[in-house]
Image: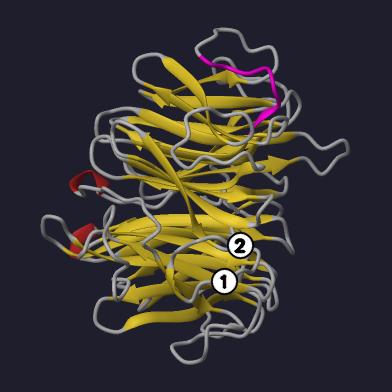
Amino acid sequence: MKTHASGRVGVLAAAVFVALFTSACWRVGAIDGPSAGSGAGRTTDDVHADKSAISLPVLPGFPPLTEPVVAYYDTTAHRLRLGIDAVSTGWNFRDLDGAGVAGGAGRVADDVGHFVSIAGAFPNLEPQIDGFYLDATNGRLRHFRSAGLSTTLTFEDLDGPGVPGGAGRTGDPSGVYNSAVNGIGLHDFYTSSTSVKPAQQRLRHTWFDGSWHFEDVDGPGATSTGATSDNVGAFVSAASSGSGLHVFYADSTTGRLRYAHLDSGVWTTQDLDGPGVGGGAGRTGNSVGTYNAAVATGDGKLHDYYYDAAAHRLRHAWFDGSWHFENLDGPGVAGAGGRTGNNVGSSTATVAGDATTLDVFYADETAHTLRHAHFDGTIWKFEIADGAGSASTGGTTTDSVGQDNAAAYNAPGIQLHFFTGDTNNGDLRHGCNTAFGAPAPALCN
């Protein structure tokens, strides 16, 4: 779920890309699900839900040759699926884990794939994908690793009831709201909730340095500087910048946006925005902090996009030595540039281009469309990327879209990609764009 990010944020080495994206020049269509046709491992199942995307390097260079990768949940078969748009063959899809998926390697026959978040790496000039997701049957955090573009797959339970291994693991149900980061090592952030009612929710962290480690970052029992005893960790989104890790998430008790920062091995947590949070700088007293999407730009600034549940707006927080806050889109937000007065800001996904450019995708809950905001380093511009009113090219739809979004850049062609769900018929939808003012590309690279 975005978060998902993903969750569900998906750009790797994005600082090498010069991005000028916006306009209605999108090539869009269904790539998996009931309306997507057959072949290449496609399914007719409902696949509109939780998803996460990355741009995966497959050959070195400057910029490196990359391929879009999307992981998503099959709500019909209760499986985790993976799609890769290979340069040589185009889209290929497969079931990864869950009931009826053959292949061993640690797979389970459980309901798996909710809250998936993936991260990419290129160790020893070999593509690698790491994914974190929920086993809803057992309340466990699971992990898969794909080496060599799915040629070698391994699966394991990481955390939750009955998972052995110590190293800070918990016996509480775990694995909701994953956000994976592979910038300064492989990390995942997720929530755990006690089985005893009323449930207490904590923000958890796992990382891999040759072996797995686990800890509570915030919530009841956490010992980080500034930690709260509130229920925290929902809608988590993480980003890496320099040597630090930055995590944004909701405080479900107070309706606040929370922030955790890891620097030199020490966690510091704080309230950023919401009811009772002082400091001015554009903060609001409304209930905020859900649907986070975080990213760091090449100029060193940290950004988070999130939902104002009271005003039905998309909010933006950024740090450039101090914190700043603004309403970006929605009812009563000034600035024109294609903004709307509709209920917007849920299901956010974001990527950063070069040093200053930013792209954000989010739902318009009033019009049931996917919206896109682009910052060119100077001004914000807004448009409908998919759904009714979009001027996109190809398989346009008037169905309800914009839920559980994910995004990634890709080279060659330096395209921007989005992935969204069609809730009318269960499709996984995809769009690509090349440059501001340019015609829609003939193909999505």
Residue 117 in view of the camera:
no
Q: Position of residue 336 (x, y in %)?
A: 48, 34
Residue 319: which disc? none
219 and 86: which is toward the camera: 86
Asked if residue 41 is positioned above or below residue 303 in the image, the reply reads below
Q: Is residue 72 left or right of residue 231?
A: left
Left or right: where 386 falls relative to 183: right
Image point 57% across, 63% down: which residue? 387
User: Residue 372 placed where, x, y %?
Assistant: 46, 49
> What is the three-letter code of the residue carrying label 2?
Val
Answer with the quarter of the image where residue 230 lies.
top right
Give the image location of residue 298, x and y in percent: 25, 35
Q: Main secondary structure of the magenta part?
A: loop
Secondary structure under the numbered disc 2 in the rendered image: loop
Q: Is residue 377 above or below residue 402?
A: above
Residue type at mark 1: give it.
Thr
Answer with the quarter of the image where residue 400 lies.
bottom right
Labelled pair 2, 1 in contact (Cβ < 8 Å) = yes
Q: Residues within 10 Å of mark 2 (few under 14, many from 20)?
A: many
Q: Residue at 51% x, 24% y: name it.
A: 326
The image's mark for residue 397 is: 1
Q: Nearer the viewer, residue 232 or 85?
A: 85
- In the rendered view, does 421 fall on the left or right side of 38? right
Disc 2: which residue: 401
Q: Which residues are magenta?
A: 282-289
The answer to whether residue 176 of the structure is visible from this angle is yes
